[in-house]
Image (tube, rainbow, N blue to C red):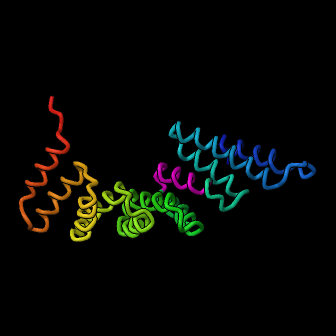
Amino acid sequence: MYKPSHAYNLLFSLVVMALVSTASCVSFPAKQEFLVQEALAEGARFLTESRFVEAAEVFQTALDVVPDDARLLYNLSLAQAQADDSTSAIATIGLLVRLFPENVKYLKAQAAILQESGASTEACPVWEQVLIRDPFDEVVRLRLANQYFIDSEYELSQKHAFMLYSREQYSRELFLLCSRLELALGGGDGSAWILLADAYFPVERE
């Protein structure tokens, strides 16, 4: 026999509190916002406790009442991803990006979820879209360059790595990637890049 979870019972009570009083002077949008805020707070608590399935249930139950709320969809996708439900996470973040295609934060989340689920072929074009909107995001560009290298797309990896280098957005990770690229493309033994990595970012030795 099905027994509603604590998360479901909580959200059911919130729905009742927010929506049943039709005679109230509080507007329906205000009631919806109250429900969303309560769901976000309770879901965040579950997330901090690593109770990802319960967090996802809280967000999903609220979405049944307030469909297409961006905050709920975003947090639902993260909870699903952390609960190892990559299929649902990809679907949820995909819906969010379709609703808000210009939002860089949501595009980053979509690319990260795709990449972490092993769908790097789908993730890389999304990272490219992020860079179109924010071309100076060095974290995203380095992540994309590394992913292209993993996928043996060495020329694309080199393009992004050299763009970081030309902008002096240096990091030890970048120099080591350039070393591996030099070896992969047959341009040298990569040792010069390792020297740069050690010069700019020396590793502390005990």
Q: Is residue 174 left or right of residue 189?
A: right
Relative depth, front residue between 126 and 122: 126
Q: Is residue 67 left or right of residue 96?
A: right
Displayed quadrant of residue 192: bottom left
Q: Which residue is depicted at the point 52% across and 66% down?
A: 94
Instruction: Name the residue located 40 percent from the left edge and 59 percent from the top edge.
Output: 117
Residue placed farthest to the top in the image?
206
Left or right: residue 105 versus residue 116 is: right
Q: Position of residue 151 (x, y in %)?
A: 26, 66
Residue 65 shown left or right of residue 133 in the figure? right
Decide which of 164, 109 is in the foreground and name it: 164
From this view, report whether residue 165 is shown above or below residue 13.
below
Regarding residue 83, the answer to whether it shows in the image is yes
Say if 39 sits above or below 143 in the image.
above
Residue 54 lies, in percent from the top left, at: 59, 45
Q: Is residue 73 highlighted in magenta?
A: yes
**Which segment did they paint magenta?**
72-85
Q: Overall secondary structure of the magenta stretch? A: helix
Place of residue 105 in the rendered image (x, y in percent of width and height, measured from the top left)? 50, 57
- Residue at (62% x, 49% y) in the render: 57
- The picture places residue 44, in percent across and down from the top left corner, at 58, 42
Q: Residue furthest front?
A: 167
Total marks in image: 0
| Residue 174, picture quadrant | bottom left
For image coordinates 64% across by 48% down, the residue present is 58
- Taking the magenta stretch, the answer to whether it contains residue 23 is no
Residue 1 appears in view: no
Give above or below for 175 relative to 41: below
Which quarter of the rendered picture does the C terminus lie within?
top left
